[in-house]
C-alpha cells in the first residue's frame, strides 16, 4: 500500500531516510490499492521508493516480488515494464541526479528473503542499469545467478561523484568507481544498510546484525563501533540538520 504527502520535497534520489528533505508537518493521504487479494500474501510489500530529482511527480517504487513501477502523476497511476527481468524482486533504486536517464536497481527481496516464504525467486540477479530512463535494463559488473543466494540490501550513490556507488549485501560491502562496470569488496559480512554522512561523502556508516562500522576515507578502512545488543537487522539514518547525529 502507498501513501503520499503533498509536503514532501524531492532531493537526492533514494529512500526518504537518506538524503531527501521533508517537513515535520507532512500530511499523508492513502492512494491505494484499496482491494487486498485473498488466498494469502496480502497486497504485497514495497521495498523502496525513489523520486526523480528533477520532477517530484515522477515516482519509482520497487516491489518485493512485483518488479519496478513508475508514476508520472505523483502516484495516481502506475505502470511497469519489468516483468521479464531476471529477478522481479527490487530492493533499492538509485537515480543519477546529473542525468536522470541513468538509473540503477538492486534486485532481490532484501529483508523478506530471511523469512518463511524464502524461495529462489527472491534472491538477487545483481545490479541492473538503465541509460534510457528505465525503458531497458542491462547487467552491471555486480551480477549473480540466483542460486548464489546473494542479496543486495542497499545501494547508495556518492552525491559528489555519481560514478561512485556502494552496495550493502549479505556478502559484504562493495564499491564501484566506474558507474557499475567493476566492483571491489571492501569488507566481508552480512550487511543490511549503508549511509553517507550528509556533510562529507568520505564518511560512511554501515551495519550488520550486531554492530555498525564507520569509515572516514571512503571505505579504504572501516572501524567497528560499539556492539549493539541485537540479533536482527540494522537500519541507519543520518540527518543534514546535524551531521554528527546518526540513528
Image (cartoon, grey):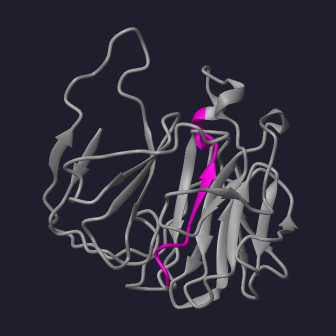
Q: Residue at x 71, y 51 (%)?
A: 210
Is there any visible trace of residue 135 in the rendered image? Answer: yes
Q: For this view, does 232 lie left or right of residue 30?
A: right
The segment highlighted magenta reads 99-112
Where residue 129 appears, as percent x and y from the top left, is 63, 63
Report which quarter residue 102 is drawn in: bottom right
Residue lying furthest top in this view? 39
Q: For this view, does 150 lie left or right of residue 12?
A: right
Q: Residue at x 66, y 29 (%)?
A: 121
Q: Residue at x 52, y 84 (%)?
A: 244
244, above or below 21, in the image:
below
59, above or below 209, in the image:
below
Nearest to the observer: residue 19 or residue 231: 19
Where residue 187 appears, as percent x and y from the top left, is 85, 65
Report which quarter residue 178 is drawn in: bottom right
Nearest to the observer: residue 49 or residue 241: 49
Q: Residue at x 80, y 75 (%)?
A: 222
Is there any visible trace of residue 211 in the rendered image? Answer: no
Reply yes or no: does residue 157 show up in magenta: no
Reply yes or no: does residue 100 show up in magenta: yes
Where residue 64 appears, as percent x and y from the top left, is 51, 37
230, above or below 49, in the image:
above
Count of numbered badges drawn on the protein: 0
Q: For this view, does 119 lie left or right of residue 36?
A: right
Report which quarter residue 30 is drawn in: top left
Nearest to the observer: residue 129 or residue 91: 129
- In which quadrant of the rendered image does the N terminus lie? top left
Amino acid at each position: 500500500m502507498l501513501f503520499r504527502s503533498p509536503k514532501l520535497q524531492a532531493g537526492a534520489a533514494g529512500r526518504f531516510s537518506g538524503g531527501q528533505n521533508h517537513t515535520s508537518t507532512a500530511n499523508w493521504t492513502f492512494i491505494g490499492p484499496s482491494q487486498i487479494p485473498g488466498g494469502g500474501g496480502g497486497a504485497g510489500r514495497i521495498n523502496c521508493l525513489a523520486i526523480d530529482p528533477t520532477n517530484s511527480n515522477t515516482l519509482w517504487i520497487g516491489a518485493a516480488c512485483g518488479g519496478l513501477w513508475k508514476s508520472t502523476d505523483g502516484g495516481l497511476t502506475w505502470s511497469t515494464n519489468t516483468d521479464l527481468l531476471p529477478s522481479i524482486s527490487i530492493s533499492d533504486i538509485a537515480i543519477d541526479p546529473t542525468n536522470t536517464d541513468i538509473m540503477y536497481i538492486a534486485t532481490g527481496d532484501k529483508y523478506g528473503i530471511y523469512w518463511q516464504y524464502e524461495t529462489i525467486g527472491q534472491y538477487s540477479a545483481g545490479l541492473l542499469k538503465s541509460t534510457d530512463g528505465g525503458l531497458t535494463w542491462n547487467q552491471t559488473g555486480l551480477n549473480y545467478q540466483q542460486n548464489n543466494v546473494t542479496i543486495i540490501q542497499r545501494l547508495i550513490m556518492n552525491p559528489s561523484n555519481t560514478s561512485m556507488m556502494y552496495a550493502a549485501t549479505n556478502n559484504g560491502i562493495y564499491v564501484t568507481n566506474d558507474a557499475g562496470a567493476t566492483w571491489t569488496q571492501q569488507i566481508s559480512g552480512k550487511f543490511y544498510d549503508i549511509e553517507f554522512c550528509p556533510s562529507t561523502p568520505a564518511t560512511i556508516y554501515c551495519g550488520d546484525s550486531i554492530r555498525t562500522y564507520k569509515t572516514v576515507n571512503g571505505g579504504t578502512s572501516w572501524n567497528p563501533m560499539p556492539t549493539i545488543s541485537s540479533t536482527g537487522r540494522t537500519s541507519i539514518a543520518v540527518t543534514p540538520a546535524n551531521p554528527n547525529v546518526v540513528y
